[in-house]
Amino acid sequence: MPGPFPERNNSLMNNSFRDYFRCPSNAIRFAVRNGLSENAGFFQFGKGVVGYGKYSQYQPSTTAGGNLPDATKDVKLESGTVCLPFHLDEVIDNLRFERYTEERQYGSSSDGPISSLYYAIRPILPVAIRRHLQRVYLSNWKKIAFPQWPVDHTVDSIMRGALQLLLRAEQLEKIPFIWFWPDGASSSITMTHDVETTAGRDYCGSVMEINESFGMSASFQIIPETRYEVSEKFLESIRNRGFEVNVQDLNHDGRLYNERNEFKRRATKINEYGRLFKATGFRSAILYRRQEWYSDLEFSYDMSVPSSGHLEPQRGGCCTVMPYFVGKLLEVPVTTTQDYSLFNYLRSFSIDLWKQQIELILEQNGLISFIVHPDYIMKTREAGIYQELLGHLASVRAKKNAWTATPGEIDRWWRQRSKMELVHDGDNWKIEGAGSERARVAYASEKEGKLVFTMQNALEGQPSANLLEQP
């Protein structure tokens, strides 16, 4: 580099890596060492980065805690190829699709008898008792070894580690890729509002006023049946102010993913409501999910998977702070703690945790996504905390050049980026494809043992001095 990469055997390409970075196909050269174990398990890929998959030569650990084998010691760099002791695609998919969790063996937490009993009697339980039972159920969250808390970016760390190995294997000064966000933004911020009750529905106008005062766009997830009346006038009141409308579950009874045929039946109705609401996005109630069933949903994107689900009834998490595709559907993960969890489980009434999560996500140039319910910020104290959060986000937007966008805008950008290509242009690179005028060429290089991202100057075609070091 500079100069085109040599032609290579496409069988060595790695789909998840290429989709993540959008770098030239011929720059990617991974292989898998022989003798993968029969069963998947946990291992490390560098200090504190836990992977899950089949491993070369021996069986990895059945648990995420303890002294895990370090895969970086079993990596071989041969003839410009990175030979990994695991299959990168498999490990990334295992993490994103939560195949490492025990719950993955039988589905969402809504399947269990305790959950079924809870939702059967929930309508007659006083709010205080419901919250107490929820706190008891989640009381062991601090003992969960994996994913990491308060933010998990294991997928992103593995991708960056693999990129660093490519630089070493091929003895390259730098590798170009298409930057993650439009117009060179460092990260992205998105705000979403799940509307739970009639009172929350009636407070949406006030929430929009608060958002507008901070220049924060957002989406509102509406429950189609049972909870409250949904009129076209109400939906138009959201759209006409530049906010998005999405579908939230069907009736919020916690049973959406209990049984396959029932899910198909409900999905048919949910899809009809999607067309009626003119919605392109979906979120399930309580963040219950089975990503292998998403093919039944006729939406462009979903927002039901947390990065780290310690404080969710269904544990697990996708272990990434970046959007990713589940078939044709884009997953826009939830990367911060919900307001309900903050106020009721942690009993915290400050934005300190959110600020910590924001900083961790910024380090990964990731998506900072929130769920804040109109229902839970109607009181003076909670409304003040939400406004303090928006003020902090406005500061992050200005100081860190973060892109604030609705989830629909993120979906449209990520789909455009997924089809863009880097084309060699003299001594530099250019991006081709719809939306490429907003895209930026970035370079990955290694500096003092750290991976460094450098943005190419859009006007001069030269790398800028703005270095983004990866921890």
Image (spheres, rainbow, N blue to C red):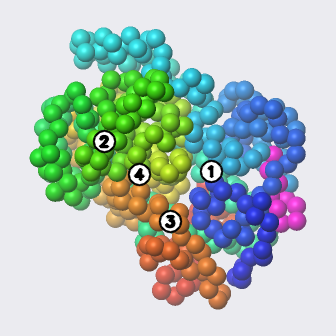
Residue 30 vs residue 144: left or right?
A: right
Q: Quadrant of residue 212?
A: bottom left
Tell me the amino acid under the disc marked 3: Arg
Q: Which mark is residue 272?
A: 2
* Eye-nearest disc, 3 or 4: 4
Q: Is residue 419 above or below residue 345?
A: below
- Marks 2 and 1, the one that precedes in the sequence: 1
Please name whichever residue, 52 or 448, is drawn nearer the observer in this view of the structure.
52
Residue 106 located within the stretch drawn in magenta: no
Tell me the amino acid under the disc marked 4: Ser
Tell me the amino acid under the disc marked 1: Ser
The boundaries of the magenta stretch are 77-85
Is there CB contact under 8 Å for labels 2 and 4? no
Q: Which mark is residue 300?
A: 4
Q: Mainly helix, strand or loop, the magenta region?
A: strand
**Label 1: which residue?**
157
* Eye-nearest disc, 2 or 3: 2
- Marks 2 and 4, the one that precedes in the sequence: 2
Measured in 3D between alpha carbons, the distance from the residue under mark 2 to the one under mark 3, in whole angstroms, is 29 Å
Query: What residue is drawn where x is 53% and y is 77%?
Result: 432
Expressed as whole percent of the image width and height from the top left, the position of residue 335 reads 45, 44
Q: Quadrant of residue 201?
A: top left
Residue 82 located within the stretch drawn in magenta: yes
Please name whichever residue, 24 or 49, is drawn nearer the observer in this view of the structure.
24
